[in-house]
Amino acid sequence: MSCAGLVPVMALAARCGLTTLLTDRVQIAVKGGANATAKILALVAVRSLQ
């Protein structure tokens, strides 16, 4: 499977400030809730490939 669609999606997320927004606004207060920003960005990346 090609990942060519991943680069523009993640570039758009970076240009929109998604990482900063997630870091500032999202906190997961359960076991395994560390690095919520990275986990959500990974979900965005996976969904862009489908």
Image: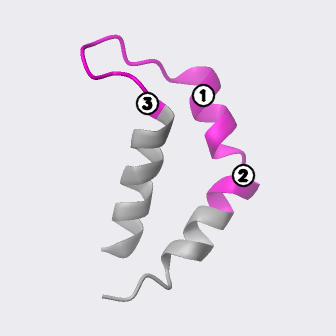
Quadrant of the rendered image containing residue 8: bottom right
Q: Residue at x 36, y 52 (%)?
A: 43
- Residue 36 image label: 3
Query: Where does the magenta region start and end?
Result: 12-36
Query: Percent from the top left, x then y, of residue 32?
Result: 27, 22
Quarter of the image that includes the C terminus: bottom left
- Rendered location of residue 5, percent (x, y): 49, 80
Observer-side mark, 3 or 2, equals 3
Residue shown at 35% from the left, 11% from the top: 29
* Numbered badge on residue 16: 2
Residue at left offset 35%, top offset 63%:
47
* Mark pair 1, 2: CA separation: 13 Å
Q: Amino acid at mark 2?
A: Cys
Question: Could you say which disc has been placed on residue 47 in the image?
Answer: none
**Residue type of the residue flagged with mark 3:** Ala
Q: If the image is split into quadrants, where does the N terminus sit?
A: bottom left
